[in-house]
Image (cartoon, helix red, strand yellow):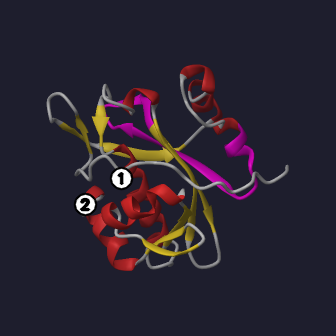
Amino acid sequence: MAKRPTTGLSFEIDKLTRSIENVVTGDSFQTVVLPCTKNDLKTASRSNGWLFNWKQESAMPGRDVFKLTIVENPAVIQGLVSLEVKSDHIAMQLVESAPFNLGRNKVYTGVLGNLVAFCCKRSFERGFAGNLAFIAKTRLIGHYEETLKAVHVGGGRMVVETDAAQYLVDKYFPA
């Protein structure tokens, strides 16, 4: 399968929360991140309002797609992330909130922060000291520096290093 050209991720961290929060009530909901199944990909499609072709992404060699759900409602996907294990870090290839978690009428905040924290957690588990890398669209570099404490290392490449990664993991995955 041919590799897609790298254009940079364009996601905005709306809020760093302890889990995910209902926008209207402020209630927090415990989440879980699990591997995405072929059945999950049937609902995470462009015809259902998702921006990316997650079925195609899951077929990419070396990529793993994970879903974020609420523990008490595991059938509803809140967001998806695709990651790739490199020799010394985790590379986040794609990340997306569910269509109902976008825009002014979103249902939950904290979805994307939760998924980035999950990638950092995986990096720690693999022995990579939490290091996470991704390519950012130029206009969002400052946003990632501010919200994720990511470091821009050039060419749009952003790196979440150990201290920032530990902060995110502690926030979303308290021991």
Q: Is residue 133 left or right of residue 164?
A: right
- Is residue 69 part of the magenta span, yes or no? yes
Q: Nearer the viewer, residue 119 or 143?
A: 143
Percent across and percent down for residue 55 are 68, 36
Q: CA distance from mark 2 to mark 1?
A: 10 Å
Percent across and percent down for residue 7 are 65, 54
Identify which amino acid the numbered label 1 is placed on.
Gly
Vertical relation: 46 (above or below) 151: above
Percent across and percent down for residue 117 are 38, 59
Dot 2, how many residues are within 10 Å of its Cα: few (below 14), some (14-19), or many (20+)?
some
Looking at the image, do the residues carrying marks 2 and 1 touch, with CB atoms under 8 Å apart? Answer: yes
Magenta residues (range): 56-78
Residue 29: image quadrant is top left
Q: Determine the secondary structure under disc 1.
A: helix
Instruction: Name the residue rendered at 74%, 50% in the picture.
Output: 60
Residue behind mark 1: 113
Identify which amino acid the numbered label 2 is placed on.
Lys
Q: Determine the secondary structure under disc 2.
A: helix
- Is residue 67 part of the magenta span, yes or no? yes
Percent across and percent down for residue 145 are 37, 67
Instruction: Name the residue rendered at 40%, 70% in the picture.
Output: 150
Q: Nearer the viewer, residue 168 or 175?
A: 168
Instruction: Name the residue rendered at 74%, 45% in the picture.
Output: 59
What number is the disc on residue 171? Answer: 2
Q: In this view, which residue lies farthest toward the right? A: 1
